[in-house]
Amino acid sequence: MMRKQYTAAFKAKVVQDLLKEEKTLAQLASEYEVHATQLKTWRAVALEGLASLFEKQDSTVALQAAHEQQLTDLYAEIGKLTSAL
């Protein structure tokens, strides 16, 4: 018997419904035809990953600032070299 494969979008939708807490775990398991244990696993993965979403954003901002500083430094160096000619 082949195992069911679920898309990331499907898992995200199910976890969003889980986090709303409008229905019980058993109701959602029945509605989506996914075992309750699997739903608990997906919820745990989602909650663990939440912090990393913000870390990526923070690191992107830091990389962008470093890149802009590097550009500023390079333009300053070009200016010095140009005026030295």
Image: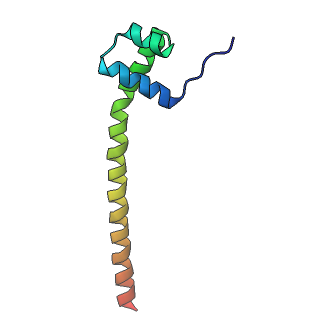
Left or right, 82 with reference to 3: left
Q: Farthest residue toward the top? A: 26
Residue at left 49%, top 10%? Answer: 35
Left or right, 1 with reference to 73: right
> In the rendered image, which quarter is residue 51 located in?
top left
Residue 66 at what x, y percent from top left? 34, 58
Q: Give the quarter of the figure containing the C terminus.
A: bottom left
Residue at left 35%, top 10%? Answer: 24
Decide: is 56 above or below 83.
Answer: above
Q: Farthest residue toward the right? A: 1
Q: Give the quarter of the figure containing the N terminus.
A: top right
Q: Farthest residue toward the front? A: 31
Left or right, 6 with reference to 18: right
Give the total of numbered labels.
Answer: 0
**Between 20 and 3, which is closer to the camera in this rendering?**
20
Residue 6 at what x, y percent from top left? 55, 24
Residue 55 at what x, y percent from top left? 34, 40
Residue 60 at what x, y percent from top left? 37, 50
Decide: is 58 above or below 7.
Answer: below
Q: Farthest residue toward the bottom? A: 85
Residue at left 35%, top 31%? Answer: 50
**Between 82 and 1, which is closer to the camera in this rendering?**
1
**Between 7 and 85, which is closer to the camera in this rendering?**
7
Decide: is 52 above or below 75.
Answer: above
Coloring applied to the structure: rainbow
Left or right, 73 with reference to 29: left
